[in-house]
Image (spheres, rainbow, N blue to C red):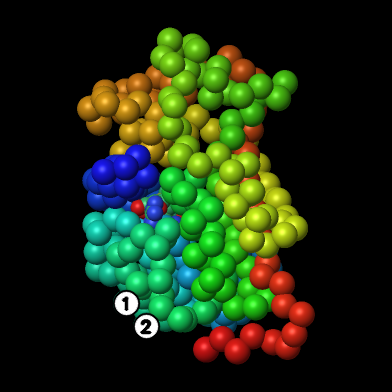
């Protein structure tokens, strides 16, 4: 099995094991739903549009886009357990959740086209973002948009990288695969397809409790401390962020987003 397939298998396994804690995290913080809404608002998502939600998890983004924007959403995710959990709770007929690989959309999507393809906090886990974006572009109506929200930056008051600081304080090496695809690589893939792309960011004050909860999701902690048991990872995550706030002043969590369009010189889209 090549590296990319191995990554995907690990990702699927990690998210299969993440459901309960992921759901508890969302119940407490409402984070993934609000990140999806922030992305929608930022890119000016239109009411009643059709959306392909790639790396949809258990359908949080699909649910808010359908509720707030009246969208029809097809969600695709590698994790069978995530999709099963989503189907168990989501009975909205405008939402369809399907197991599949976002880097290989054709078997699922066929010739259907969408007004938007979105990746809410998922593109950074894709080993081949260029392939994913190529596939997304093919499924996009003329004039449609591809947009993603990205993994957080932790920025100190002096501009320093607080991940770096936190790992040094803990005496652990910076993980090699905190993300699989860098922001610059994902943006290049988008720009290669869409030409000019737009970057956006939202910030929130450094919140240690939030970070400890976010990185305690099994799939997130596995990317920070690979090869350790979940209990070890949980304790390491707690220590990693504890005290960072006091030591580093206020600091910020920075959430980045990017969007690109499929240019259309002609009339409006004939999407269903
Ligand atoms: C952090 S979760 C975000 C889920 C969802 N977008 C949300 O807002 O709750 C990332 C998701 O991306 C999925 N994923 C990662 N790589 C994928 C791929 N190649 N194809 C489809 N889904 C993928 C994972 O299984 C996981 O459910």
The quarter of the image holding the N terminus is top left
Question: At 71% across and 72% down in the image, what residue appears?
Answer: 263
Determine contact: label 1, label 2, CB under 8 Å: yes
For ligand 1, tell me if the residue under mark 2 lies within 8 Å: no
Residue at position x 43%, y 10% from top? 171
Nearer to us in this view, 81 or 235? 81
The residue tagged 2 is 93
Viewer-side residue, 166 vs 265 = 265
Report if residue 21 is visible in the image: no
Residue drawn where x is 43% and y is 16% of the image: 173
Q: Secondary structure at mark 1?
A: loop
Q: Residues within 10 Å of mark 2 (few under 14, many from 20)?
A: few
Q: Position of residue 270 (x, y in %)?
A: 60, 89
Residue 121 placement, left or right of 251:
left
Which mark is drawn over residue 254? none
Q: Is residue 164 above or below residue 206?
A: above
Q: Position of residue 108 (x, y in %)?
A: 36, 73
What whole-number distance in Å separates the C-alpha atoms at marks 1 and 2? 6 Å
Q: Up-down: is 80 above or below 247?
A: below
Give the residue displayed 63% in from the left and 42% down from the top.
184
Queried on whether the Cβ of the residue with tag 1 lies below 8 angstroms from ligand 1, the answer reads no
Q: Which residue is mark 1?
A: 91
200 left or right of 103? right
């Amino acid at each position: 099995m090549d590296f990319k397939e191995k990554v995907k298998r690990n990702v699927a396994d990690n998210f299969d094991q993440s459901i309960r804690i992921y759901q508890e995290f969302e119940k407490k913080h409402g984070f993934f739903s609000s990140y999806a809404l922030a992305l929608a608002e930022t890119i000016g998502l239109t009411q009643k549009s059709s959306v392909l939600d790639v790396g949809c998890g258990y359908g949080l983004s699909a649910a808010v886009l359908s509720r707030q924007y009246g969208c029809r959403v097809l969600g695709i995710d590698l994790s069978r357990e995530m999709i099963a959990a989503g189907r168990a709770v989501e009975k909205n007929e405008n939402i369809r959740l399907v197991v599949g690989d976002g880097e290989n959309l054709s078997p699922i999507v066929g010739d259907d086209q969408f007004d938007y393809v979105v990746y809410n906090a998922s593109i950074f886990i894709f080993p081949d973002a260029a392939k994913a974006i190529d596939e997304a572009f093919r499924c996009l109506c003329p004039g449609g948009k591809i947009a993603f929200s990205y993994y957080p930056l932790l920025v100190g008051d002096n501009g320093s990288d607080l991940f770096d600081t936190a790992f040094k304080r803990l005496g652990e090496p910076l993980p090699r695969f905190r993300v699989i695809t860098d922001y610059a690589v994902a943006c290049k893939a988008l720009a290669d397809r869409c030409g000019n792309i737009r970057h956006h960011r939202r910030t929130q004050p450094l919140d240690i409790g939030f970070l400890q909860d976010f990185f305690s999701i099994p799939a997130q902690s596995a990317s920070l401390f690979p090869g350790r048991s979940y209990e070890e990872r949980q304790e390491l995550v707690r220590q990693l962020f504890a005290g960072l706030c006091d030591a580093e002043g206020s600091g910020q969590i920075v959430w980045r987003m990017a969007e690109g369009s499929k240019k259309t010189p002609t009339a409006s889209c004939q999407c269903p």
